[in-house]
Image: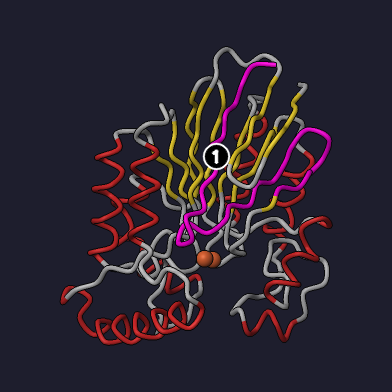
Amino acid sequence: MKVTHSFTDDSAVIRMEGLARPVRMLHLTDTHLRFFDERDGEKFQACVEYTKRIEEHHRERGTEPDPEKPFRQSMAQAATENLDLLALTGDIIHFPSPASVEFIVEQIAELGVPAIYTSGNHDVHYTDEPVNAEIRLTRLAALQPLHNGDPDCSARDIGGIRFVSVDNSVPQLSRKQVDFVKAQLQEDQPTVLLFHWPLSLPTLRDAVIEKLGSPPMMGDPDWSSQSRTAWQVSEDTLETLEFVEAVTTAQNVVATFCGHVHFAHADAINTRAVQYVGAPGYEGGRRLVEFRPL
Ligand SMILES: [Fe+2]
Ligand SMILES: [Fe+2]
């Protein structure tokens, strides 16, 4: 299958041999919306304190303190873009509060476009608790209205393209997730993957280290154990490495879309596929993607 890519930080055109019709997708990631109320119970105070800290952070830098503004602007623009799909790839909300979940569910319903939601590290925990697989499990019920199905992994065909989402919020993958992805890839349809933590690619790695001081990505070949501990991330498991291998070598993967590192980038995975990293939605980041027949 021949595939070509052209892109900017906020757009991409992916031409694919054999595609029957154009497909338009908005990729949105890392909006870090933070609504909360009395339903957060014992977590309420942590939400108040986090909000104070982050607003102060933005005030010091002269950047927009309220992520709701760029989110609403992006959704208003989305309503004019004749979309086939809204892809939300994690850290869309900063903690799994009922108010944040409700807001996103309402916004998606108002837009009226099919949406795929996969979690980031922030979706699955409150700011005063650790982030790990156990905490994630306790938050899945709260996030269910967003995933609207299996939160671990899902697949949907739109316009002849298979969109596969994988929750790598913690970020190691389970055997179930890897087996699911490999089964999807074996069906030999053109496939796009959606997840939060990027794959570590040689052309992305230096830029991430320059911005964050470490390479918090999947399958990174040289991420120190000290930095992993700071990020609350274990060594990559065999399952995670198997996933990276499957995605980077499959003949039918045309693109992956992710976020997490908070800047826009696009990197060749191989001669067909490109990994698109989205700029953070809290800064107005978004990428309009057009899949077109070649
Ligand atoms: Fe983020
Ligand atoms: Fe993240």
Query: Toward the viewer: 217 or 211?
Result: 211
Viewer-side residue, 2 vs 164 = 2
In the rendered view, does 138 fall on the left or right side of 162? left
Seen as rendered, the residue at the extreme left is 38
Q: Position of residue 181 (x, y in %)?
A: 61, 42
Q: Compared with residue 47, is residue 190 higher up or lower down, i.e. above or below?
A: above
Q: Secondary structure at mark 1?
A: strand
The residue sitting at 70% across, 82% down in the picture is 227
The residue furthest front is 62
Side (left or right) of 5 relative to 61? right
Quarter in which the C terminus is drawn: top right
Q: Residue at x 62, y 60 (%)?
A: 263
Query: Which quadrant of the structure image shows residue 44?
Result: bottom left
Residue 115 shown left or right of residue 244 in the figure: left
**Image-quadrant location for residue 124:** bottom left
Q: Amino acid at mark 1?
A: Val
Q: Quadrant of the N terminus?
A: top right
Which residue is tagged 1?
A: 164
Residue 282 on image: x %, y % = 45, 62
> Is label 1 within 8 A of ligand 2 (CB to nearest ligand atom)?
no
Magenta residue span: 266-294
